Image (spheres, grey):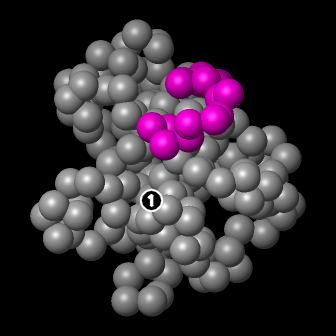
Amino acid sequence: MLVLVIGDFHIPDRAPKLSEKFRQLLIPGKISQIICLGNLTSTSVYEYLKHVCSDLKLVKGAFDISSKAPIAGKITLGSFKIGYTNGHLVVPQDSPEALSILAREMDADILLFGGTHKFAAYELDGCFFVNPGSATGAPNVSAVEDDEKIVPSFVLMDVQGAVLILYVYRIFDGEVRVEKMQYRKPE
């Protein structure tokens, strides 16, 4: 089962559109479920994601003002309990310790979070944390302040029992690069 984890679009406020290179990869019928970590900021992005896969789980991001989406959600895939949130209410934002507390509160084996616009994947305290980054490469406040370039990215998760295979898609110099990672649930 392939699950697309994506978010932080900020279309049209901070980015004009999703890259054509990514659009060519996100073909309807290939993805079983989408977990969107918020900051869609337009109904056209929501409609596009629903076109790619009708099974869309969505949480509210800091800039999804009119969204009725929840702040967080939880699903089970294989033997994993997966929590997901935008991360804008985690204080301090992107703090591994604060995210670890949230994962424990959610009783999650994997915590998906957004809000920073930067891809991250790491293990801490028996939990695996994944931030898919910004689908459009839209800058966040700290990137603008630091004159940092945000790399467009998303991830595909393939759960096989107690093993998560993570495919990280990023655009570098106009080309899509894919990195494969694996996480095995501790026994």
- Disc 1 crowd rating (10 Å Cα; few below 14, some 14-19, many 20+) is many
The spot of residue 156 in percent (x, y) is 58, 56
Query: Where in the figure is residue 82, as x and y percent of width and height?
Result: 54, 28
Q: Does residue 128 appear anywhere in the picture? A: no
Tag 1 secondary structure: loop
Q: Is residue 88 magenta?
A: no
Q: Residue at (20%, 29%) from the top-left corner?
A: 92
Rendered image quadrant of residue 129: top left
Rendered location of residue 117, percent (x, y):
37, 55
Q: Is residue 107 visible?
A: yes
Q: Position of residue 148 (x, y in %)?
A: 20, 69
- Residue span colored magenta: 61-80
Q: Locate the C terminus by quadrant.
A: top left
Q: Residue at (27%, 73%) from the top-left corner?
A: 149
Q: Would residue 43 appear left or right of 143 to someone viewing this image?
A: right
Q: Main secondary structure of the magenta part?
A: loop
Rendered image quadrant of residue 26: bottom right
For the point 53% across and 58% down, which residue is it? 9
Question: In the image shown, does 31 or 47 lie closer to the viewer?
Answer: 47
The residue carrying mark 1 is 134
Of the residues shown, which amino acid type is indicated by label 1? Ser
Q: Within the image, what quadrant is residue 146 found in?
A: bottom left
- Where 56 sits versus 17, above or below? above
